[in-house]
Image (cartoon, grey):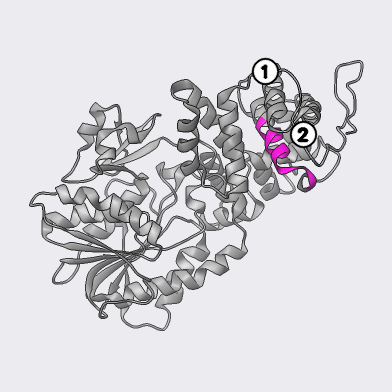
Amino acid sequence: MSTSRAGADGRAGRPGRPPRRHRPAKSAPITVDPARKAAYDLLRDVDEREAYANLAMPAILREAGLAGRDAAFAVELGYGTLRRRGTWDAVLAACVDRPLSEVDPGLLDLLRLGTHQLLGTRVPPHAAVSATVDLARIAAGAGPSRYVNAVLRRVAERDPDGWLATVAPPRDSDLVGHLAVRHSHPRWVVTAFADGLGGDLAEAEQLLVADNTAPKVSLVARPGLATVAELQELGAEPGRWSPYAATLEHGDPTALEPVRAGRAGVQDEGSQLVTLALAAASVDGRDNHWLDLCAGPGGKAALLAALAAPQGARLLAVERAPHRAKLVSAALRGSAALPGGEVTALTVVADGTVPAWPAGSFDRVLVDVPCTGLGALRRRPEARWRRQPADIGALRPVQTGLLTAAVDAVRPGGLVGYVTCSPHLGETRVVVSDVMRGRTDLELVDARPYFPGVPDLGDGPTVQLWPHRHGTDAMYLALLRRT
């Protein structure tokens, strides 16, 4: 391997090409910080297995036996590196001698992890470099570890502002490009966020900042099964908007008995609010047959079932994928403990676009369609790097097909709640307009009155929640009445 040597002033030159194949170093055992190792394992799982960070990290922490401050440090390093990957890649591109696409993926994740420690945390520079080099020796070998050392020493030559002044486009001449690099979002996502905010790039920047701020763990106390007061006794704080919401500053929510028993669950407050709005909006006539058309993984279905039970309504939860249907059934297991002990919810494996029920069978229908997930980048930071603009067009036929099926399933006078965890106009207003065009049996209902106390809901009749305005995921709700 050809690597530039440090000069007399201690600064490393531009590193050369690392070896294509890594061989473990034959040296004395090296002690690696388990928190950094856990963060690196997360990065590799996300890259190699396309894992979701919020699902992979708890298992990694359990396997490593990490808890408390060590677990919190591992989460900060792993999630922080994923969130700031775009910024750190811009810095690293200025510190290596070839395109990052030609750097070994495992080695690139080590460089990202080290760069995040240097520029995104309070870890002392010498500790950030030495600990990452030790990890590289174990993960890649002696030769690559020297390469990591050389690159990170060059990264350490400047502070974050100094690097941004070098690698980000000028704010005055290319504001979108500047925001994309500074706040680590793909350029197309920055533009889409601004479009959803009426073209306001200044407010879009607030949203980008919120996306890079780690959210608290959001819980739901399912009505009739648990209370917020019960969760408070276990260390949670009440939520801001939903009467059933609570938040944990840190810790594993599955350690709480109400969560393990299915009486409470992990659910973003925005998801609670759109579900509550559908349940609260008025329907004409009967109100005892409810449908969740895309129920996996089951959080909204469990809340709907708990809301339906007191008024004698029953929920049919439909999920196409068998493994996700099992998650729905698990989420609904707590409903068996509702007063009366009657079964109030049923899970079936079926394709919602090929209904196995007569048209007009239901009074309320929730259709939470598959989407890009751009509204949950706080919790799934890797999604911003996986998604492409073409995904919007690819998902639209699925979204319009499911909304059409939901409309056909509801009776005249009943309601459909179209929900998606995205602020992209192509997944929200455009889909609703496409389905309503050419139909004379639909009307939009103003959803805002069913979000009591929640400010900044816009002009209606649909509702778009925002992380920077409401502290929730960017959930969208359109209420449609069948006429």
Give how far across and how far down residue 318 sits, in percent.
Answer: 32, 65
Tell me the quarter of the picture where residue 31 sits: top right
Task: Provide the residue span drawn in magenta.
Answer: 102-113
Residue sitting at x 84%, y 43%? 98
- Residue 423 against residue 137 in the figure, above or below: below
* Image spot of residue 283 (x, y percent): 19, 68
Q: Quadrant of the N terminus?
A: top right
Is residue 110 rendered magenta in the image? yes
Residue 23's tag is: 2
Query: Element type at marker 2?
Result: loop
- Name the outermost residue toward the front: 26
Q: Amino acid at mark 1?
A: Ala
What is the chief secondary structure element of the magenta stretch? helix
- Which residue carries the number 1 mark? 127
Q: Quadrant of residue 81?
A: top right
Image x and y of residue 349, in percent:
34, 66
Q: Is residue 12 left or right of residue 54?
A: right
Instruction: Name the image quarter holding residue 359.
Output: bottom left
Q: Find residue 70 and report its horizontal and vertical position in percent.
A: 50, 22
In the picture, measured across the screen, residue 270 lies left or right of residue 164, that is: left
Residue drawn at x 29%, y 55% is 329
Residue type at numbered disc 2: Arg
Q: Helix, strand or loop at disc 1? A: helix
